[in-house]
Amino acid sequence: MDYGKIKKINRLLESKEISCAELTQKYLGAIDKENPSLNAYIKTTPETAMETARRVDKKIASGEKLMPLEGVPMTLKDNISTTGIETTCCSKILSGYRPIYDATVWNILKKRNAVLLGKCNMDEFAMGSTCRTSCYGGARNPHDTSRVPGGSSGGAAAAVSGNIAAYALGSDTGGSIRQPASFCGIVGFKPTYGAVSRYGLIAFASSLDQIGPLTTSVEDAAIIYDAIAQYDKMDSTSSGMAKPAYASLNNDIKGKKIGVAKEYLDGVREDIKAEFEKSLKVFESMGAEIVHLSMPSIKYSLPVYYILACAEASSNLGRYDGIRYGYKTLTYADRNDMICKTRSEGFGTEVKRRVLLGTYVLSAGYYDAFYKKAQNLRGTIVRAFESSFAQCDFMAAPTVPMTAFPMDYTPDNPVETYLTDLCTVPVNIAGLPAVSVPCGLGSDNMPVGVQVIGRKFSEPLILNAAYKFEQAACAFKPVETGVKL
Amino acid sequence: MNYELVCGLETHVELATKTKIFCSCTTQFGGEPNTHCCPICIGLPGTLPKLNRAVVEYAVMAGLATNCEISAVSKMDRKNYVYPDLPKAYQISQYDMPLCKNGYVELSDGRKIRLTRIHIEEDAGKLVHQHGDTFIDYNRGGVPLIEIVSEPDIRSIDEAVEYMQKLQMIMRYIGVSDCKMQEGSLRCDVNVSVRPKGSDKLGTRTEIKNMNSFSHMTKALKYETERQIDILESGEKVVQETRRYNETTGCTEGMRGKEDADDYRYFREPDLVTISVPEETVNKIKAKMPEPYQQRLDRFINEYGLPEKDAQMLVERRRIADYFEAAAKGTKKPRTAANCITGQIFARLGSDDEKNDFDVKVTPENLNALIKLFDSGKIRMNLLKATLEKMLDTGRPAADFISEKDLAGIDAEALEKVCEKAVAANQGAVADYKNGKEKALKALLGAVMKETRGRANPQEAEKMLISLIK
């Protein structure tokens, strides 16, 4: 089955069945129609989109061949910096902030004439699993608009799933690409830490953040990955070790060993478990072999993640003081009062909670008990993955322990929402690549995803496995609204 | 009771790299506010730091010049605090793994002041108070600094000053900083405590922040030492706190107590990777470093036969020492070149800053050529001096000012004529000489030299004059 959009659009444009301007208009029209119910976009950029489209059309008219991503209408999560286009992380504190430079990923895509339709909704500063912490109100799930799309790249997932963008770039700190992809029934891919430049990605937790694509097919994810996974001298943590994945997609996975750690299934809902078991059968039917593993340290992932991520966030978010850019309180007594009021009014509850938690765990007297211990456990988790990969080629796990929950769902406490990250955070802690692919539907008829997790820089292998799975499982369930190609 | 000062210094030295520590903006001092800035050094959201290799190299040089061990592996950390001149709300610094450690600086009496560590970090911007408002200039933000932390080994105010001067000299000499206190490229925080002489226990200390001149440092230390002694004498206890020096009153004032001390929440900077400086790199840097100060000083005295004071004046600034060596190369008496520099050239460089910059129009090669003319006897000292003045004014070579005639010298016949003329015109001097005033001959000789524009050989002229008078 061909679920992808990128190659199809390339074909349509080159064969002149549709002009890029017409295609872009179509997407912009669909956004106008669908966005009021999805709230996937917080801002559209029709002028720049049409400008790019006309440039692409000129190129086609002159008979030039298009690059794979050229002329493809897409979107970016609102934490990816775009020159002149407001970039807010869906936080009031960055309202009105227009970057004066481009994120490296956007710079790459811009050069390839990617058609940017607008910026997408997200949890404020990527802190959340529902998209509801956005200062623009939550986005909705195209499969059922009474449910959340997940988060934090919720708007990006909703736009791609709802066919009002061919693909999106999001960011994944603890599951923020894979979790909404799973909730919205699409592909979400978090590359190895260091494979894609973070320059221009507004930081949440610097040692965990990674940019990656949200797409309707593994093929599209591989095409985008091959384009954006480049060494960048502006990002010291970018490695230059990334290998292109597209060429390996169709390799045979016969005889490959798939590790399944039983701890990944703790706390996973029964219907999700059933879908996961079915997925393993699909892999087996292609000649792969299941290896049962145990990784007891996985259970520390959540506390380790929340300590480290909050600690880094408390530092990263210190710069929003109203002095240089973004929101500034209207009335204040003096400098300290101004900074205090700006931050009190500019940040939402979840962000404040995490900044306070992060400040606390780094404080003198608590540092050893929290931050240092979490750092040590991070090492333990890294080693646990290493020994697991000594026994298998890649691992499989459910992406989320549940399906998308209702918009009005109110957890008893914040920790309950944090539990949705149970299966996604371990790879961020270890810096590994993982891709979530649709694998079926839950008892509530909502999409369920399965994750393929690999060693560092084994993108060609895990995308190959995900591609083969996607082809064999035929579990992708497209939404009927939006642009039909 | 007799008290003893116990003092340790935290010295900040701005490194003279061309670009900032984490971006490619210039480090030049001054400039219109916020013109030496980019998205990285003003910490715009999403930007990432990129460590400038030259900063690590310069800091390693500073470490080697102060006898430090260089860490093969070190890392950067974030020091979190909120102040408007710090645009990221954290300073990227080094906490528990500094680049250099366990060094020392030797004072003139041979005492060693131990250095705990030298680490690299970024400078902050500057608040400017103007027209009743506060503005921020981020030009200095991201300029590389090293912080040199000494052990509490200093025992007197004089030692503190000598230590700072020595650091200043070393850093200038190896060329890692211009160390201009008035521009803030050298500044220090002083930790001060006093104790009864003979005691080996440390007293409670206070920290005086941001000393930016030697005279302020001297005054602040004097005041603070007396203040602490007074407290102890009256039977009370010194409170551990951070103090500032008030230039107007000459006093130190409390800023904040121990309980108000900032909790900097240090943690590893996740945006930067580990800094590794393998031995091989250290050796490469060593090879690039200038000859150590003391060694060069000894060489100037022994090899060039310079008096110690002159040698010191030249070696103190590497640029001048290099200039001297180039100017003296192949000359008969290196002292001639030394005298030209410490005499005529220094006379034109009033301030220390001007000496540091050593912006001299005459190239060392041109000075060398001039001195060689003197060596060969073609010109005399007074013509050398006069020519050097003209060269210093214009930057042109000696040949432009010395004619063929000058170089040709003067024959015996011509000399006799000039001497006769001098004797005839200075009968008073002649009479004095005859009356036993030997010095009177100098006046006659002067007249001869003036007439010949210095071309005459003074010994020959003197002989000639004496024979004429007799």
Image: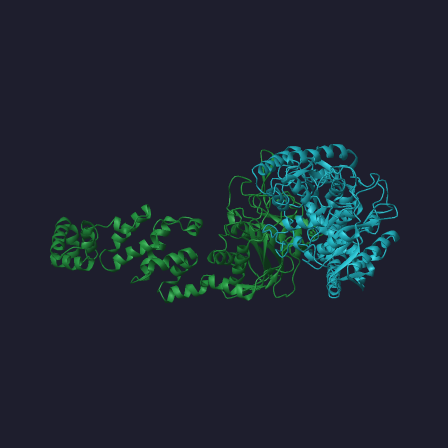
Chain colours: A cyan, B green
Front position in the image: B178 or B199: B178
Of the 4 image quadrants, the one containing the C terminus of chain B is bottom left
Q: Position of residue A227 (x, y in %)?
A: 63, 49
Front position in the image: A469 or B37: A469
Of the 4 image quadrants, the one containing the N terminus of chain B is bottom right
Q: Classify residue B423 as left or right of residue B32.
A: left
Question: Which residue is rendered at x = 82% and y = 58% of the image?
Answer: A281
Front position in the image: A48 or A480: A480
Q: Is residue A255 above or below residue A303?
A: below
- Tally of marks: 0
Asked whether residue B137 appears in the rendered view, the answer is: yes
Asked whether residue A360 appears in the rendered view, the answer is: no
Q: Classify residue A24 as left or right of residue B446.
A: right
Q: Position of residue B298 (x, y in %)?
A: 41, 66
Q: Position of residue A81 (x, y in %)?
A: 65, 42
Q: Position of residue B373 (x, y in %)?
A: 25, 57
Front position in the image: A294 or B242: A294
